[in-house]
């Protein structure tokens, strides 16, 4: 091969590489969430509503894995890893608020750090367990209803437990219709 041919071949390779870099790439469509991922997202999300519940109602009524997961979430609350992440977020929030108040010359909040942590920790667990109850009420299968029944056997020891038991009773009573219809107008 002559020098001219090598230069032409090199220029062609550079041109091909430039075209490959400049052409828009098609990204593969994201895979749809599994029923278990939808259930987990439902528990974690603050403002996720109707679509999650409708998905669980339509596809999970026979899914033992999802119902077992939601039953554990209802009876035991979030797992230790989620609790630890939440605890770190609470500690960061307390520290950030304290620093902000110090910069402004304001007094620390009236409630102690331990009171703050207890309050928001209990709220997180009650929200998690209450959303599990709501999802089980929407799913409505025999095992889902049995999971709701098993939650009624737990004696309430805190305000959060009382809230969860109220949510369980509501989930049992309304066939999931209130939960599903609550957000239809929000769409």
Image (cartoon, rainbow, N blue to C red):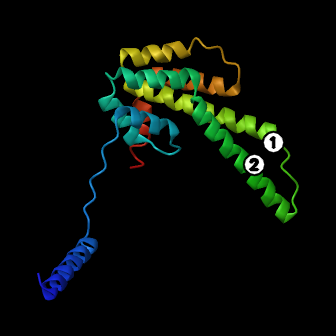
Q: Residue at x 66, y 45 (%)?
A: 89
Residue marked by disc 2: 94
Residue nearest the observer in this picture, 156 or 24? 24
Which disc is residue 101 wearing?
Answer: none
Task: Tell me if mark 1 has few (under 14), some (14-19) or many (20+) residues whose alpha carbon lies within 10 angstroms of its own.
Answer: some
In this view, which residue lies farthest toward the bottom? 4
Q: Is 64 rendered above or below residue 99? A: above
Secondary structure under tag 2 reads: helix
Give the residue at the far top of this rendering. 153
Image height of 131 relative to 175, above or below = below
Q: CA distance from mark 2 to mark 1?
A: 7 Å
Q: Is residue 87 left or right of residue 109?
A: left
55 relative position to 182: left or right: left
Instruction: Locate residue 180: give its quadrant.
Output: top left
Image coordinates for residue 110, horizontal then vertical, percent: 86, 46
Which image quarter holds the N terminus? bottom left
Q: Is residue 184 above or below residue 39?
A: below
Marks 2 & 1, CB-CB < 8 Å contact = yes
Q: Residues within 10 Å of mark 2 (few under 14, many from 20)?
A: some
The x and y percentages for residue 142 are 37, 14
Where, by quadrant of the figure, is residue 144 drawn?
top left
Residue 122, can we see it? yes
Q: Which mark is residue 113?
A: 1
Q: Residue at x 78, y 60 (%)?
A: 100
115 or 15, nearer to the observer: 15
Task: Locate residue 138: give its quadrant.
Answer: top left
Q: Residue at x 58, y 27 (%)?
A: 77
């Amino acid at each position: 091969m002559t020098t001219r041919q090598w230069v032409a071949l090199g220029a062609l390779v550079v041109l091909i590489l430039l075209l490959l870099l400049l052409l828009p790439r098609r990204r593969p469509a994201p895979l749809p969430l599994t029923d278990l991922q939808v259930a987990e997202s439902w528990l974690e999300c603050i403002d996720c509503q109707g679509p999650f519940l409708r998905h669980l109602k339509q596809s999970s009524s026979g899914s033992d894995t999802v119902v077992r997961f939601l039953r554990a979430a209802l009876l035991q609350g979030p797992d230790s890893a989620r609790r630890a992440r939440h605890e770190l977020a609470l500690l960061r929030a307390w520290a950030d608020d304290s620093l902000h108040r110090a910069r402004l010359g304001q007094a620390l909040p009236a409630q102690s750090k331990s009171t703050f942590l207890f309050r928001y920790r209990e709220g997180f667990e009650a929200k998690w367990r209450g959303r599990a109850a709501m999802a089980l009420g929407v799913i409505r299968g025999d095992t889902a209803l049995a999971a709701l029944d098993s939650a009624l056997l737990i004696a309430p020891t805190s305000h959060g437990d009382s809230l969860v038991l109220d949510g369980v009773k509501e989930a049992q009573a309304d066939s999931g219709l209130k939960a599903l219809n609550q957000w239809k107008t929000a769409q």
